[in-house]
Image (spheres, helix red, strand yellow):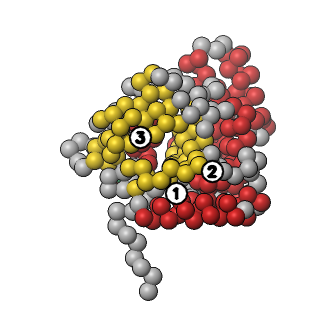
C-alpha cells in the first residue's frame, strides 16, 4: 500500500507547491492524477519516486518510509527519446534494471525477451531505440519499467507525445499489463478521457497550492473497450465531473466564452 501523509512541498524558499496531500493507494489500484497545469502533479510523483524529499509529511510504501528511490519502483516518462539508452539494443535496455535484482546474464536475457513479447516487440529485440517509432519506444520503456516486476509503477504523461491511435493502443496495453502484474500504478495525465478510461480511481488536484480537490472512484466494467466504454453514460458523466473539477481547481479561472 502507498500512503501519502500530510505531504507539503515547496522548492527553495518559494511558495507551497503542494499542501497537505493525504492519499492512500491500495495494492493493485490504478490511480490517475489530473489537474490544471502547474498544480504540482509531477512534483507529487517525484516525491513518491524518492527523487524529491517533501518539505513536510511523509510517504510510505508497504509501511516503509520512502527516503530514496524505492527498490521495487518502475517509472515511465513522456520523453521516451531521452529515457532509453540509444547505444544499447532494445533487449539490453529492458534487461538493464534487472542487474539490480542480482539475476545472471542468461536470466536477464530471458526475462527481457519475455517482457518484450508481452508488449508485442519480440521481433525488435536486437534493434536500437532510434530505429523504432515513438509508440514502439514507449512500449520498450514500459517493458523496461515492468521487467523487474515493480510493486509500484509511476507514469508521468506517458502517452502525451503519441498520436491518438497509438495512444489508445498503449492505454489498452497498460490495462493488460496492469491486470497481468497487478502493480499499484499512479499515472499523471492531462487527458481527461484517458484519466477515466484507464483508471480505477481519478484524483483531481487543484492549484495554488496543489491540494486534493476531488477523489472519484471509477465504477466502469473492468474490461474496457475504446469504443464501447467511452460511449457508456457512466463514462460520459464521470469525464464531465472530472473536467469540471479540473476547471474549478485552476487558480486563474479560464476566460468566459464571449
Ligand atoms: N525544480 C523546480 N524548482 C522550482 N520550482 C519548480 C520546480 N519544479 C516545478 N516547480 C514549480 O512547481 C509548480 C508545480 O510544478 P509541476 O511540474 O509539479 O506541476 P504539474 O501539475 O506537473 O504541471 P504540468 O501539468 O504543466 O506538467 C510550478 O509552479 C512549477 O513552476
Q: Residue at x 37, y 31 (%)?
A: 58
Label 2 vs label 1, nearer the camera: 2
Q: Report which residue position mark 2 lands on.
A: 218
Residue 103 in the image, given as x and y percentages of width and height: 64, 14
Q: Is residue 149 visible in this depiction of the protein? A: yes
Q: Residue at x 62, y 50 (%)?
A: 218
Check the image and report above or below for 208 versus 130: below
Q: Report which residue position mark 3 lands on.
A: 22
On-image quarter of the C terminus: bottom left
Q: Report which residue position mark 1 lands on.
A: 190
Label 2 secondary element: loop
Earlier along the polypeptide chain: callout 3 or callout 2? 3
Classify 10 Å Cα crowding around label 3: few (below 14), some (14-19), many (20 and above).
some
Earlier along the polypeptide chain: callout 2 or callout 1? 1
Earlier along the polypeptide chain: callout 3 or callout 1? 3
Q: Residue at x 69, y 52 (%)?
A: 220
Residue that extends furthest to the bottom in the rendered view of this protein: 258
Amino acid at each position: 500500500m502507498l500512503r501519502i501523509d500530510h505531504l507539503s512541498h515547496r522548492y527553495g524558499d518559494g511558495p507551497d507547491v503542494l499542501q497537505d496531500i493525504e492519499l492512500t493507494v491500495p495494492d493493485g489500484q490504478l490511480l490517475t492524477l489530473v489537474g490544471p497545469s502547474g498544480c504540482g502533479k509531477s512534483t507529487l510523483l517525484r516525491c513518491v519516486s524518492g527523487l524529491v524529499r517533501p518539505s513536510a509529511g511523509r510517504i510510505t510504501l508497504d509501511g516503509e518510509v520512502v527516503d530514496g528511490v524505492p527498490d521495487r519502483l518502475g517509472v515511465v516518462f513522456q520523453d521516451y527519446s531521452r529515457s532509453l539508452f540509444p547505444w544499447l539494443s532494445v533487449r539490453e535496455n529492458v534487461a538493464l534494471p534487472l542487474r539490480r535484482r542480482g539475476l545472471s546474464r542468461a536470466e536477464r536475457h530471458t526475462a527481457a525477451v519475455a517482457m518484450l513479447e508481452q508488449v508485442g516487440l519480440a521481433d525488435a529485440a536486437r534493434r536500437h531505440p532510434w530505429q523504432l517509432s515513438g509508440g514502439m519506444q514507449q512500449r520498450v520503456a514500459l517493458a523496461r519499467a515492468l521487467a523487474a516486476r515493480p510493486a509500484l509503477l509511476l507514469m508521468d504523461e506517458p502517452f502525451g507525445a503519441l498520436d491518438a491511435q497509438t495512444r489508445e493502443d498503449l492505454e489498452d496495453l497498460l490495462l493488460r499489463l496492469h491486470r497481468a502484474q497487478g502493480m499499484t500504478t499512479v499515472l499523471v495525465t492531462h487527458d481527461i478521457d484517458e484519466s477515466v478510461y484507464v483508471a480505477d480511481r481519478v484524483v483531481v488536484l487543484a492549484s495554488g497550492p496543489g491540494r486534493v480537490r476531488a477523489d472519484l472512484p471509477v465504477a466502469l466494467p473492468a474490461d474496457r473497450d475504446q469504443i464501447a466504454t467511452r460511449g457508456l453514460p457512466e463514462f460520459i458523466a464521470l469525464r464531465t465531473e472530472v473536467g469540471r473539477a479540473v476547471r474549478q481547481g485552476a487558480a486563474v479561472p479560464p476566460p468566459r466564452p464571449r
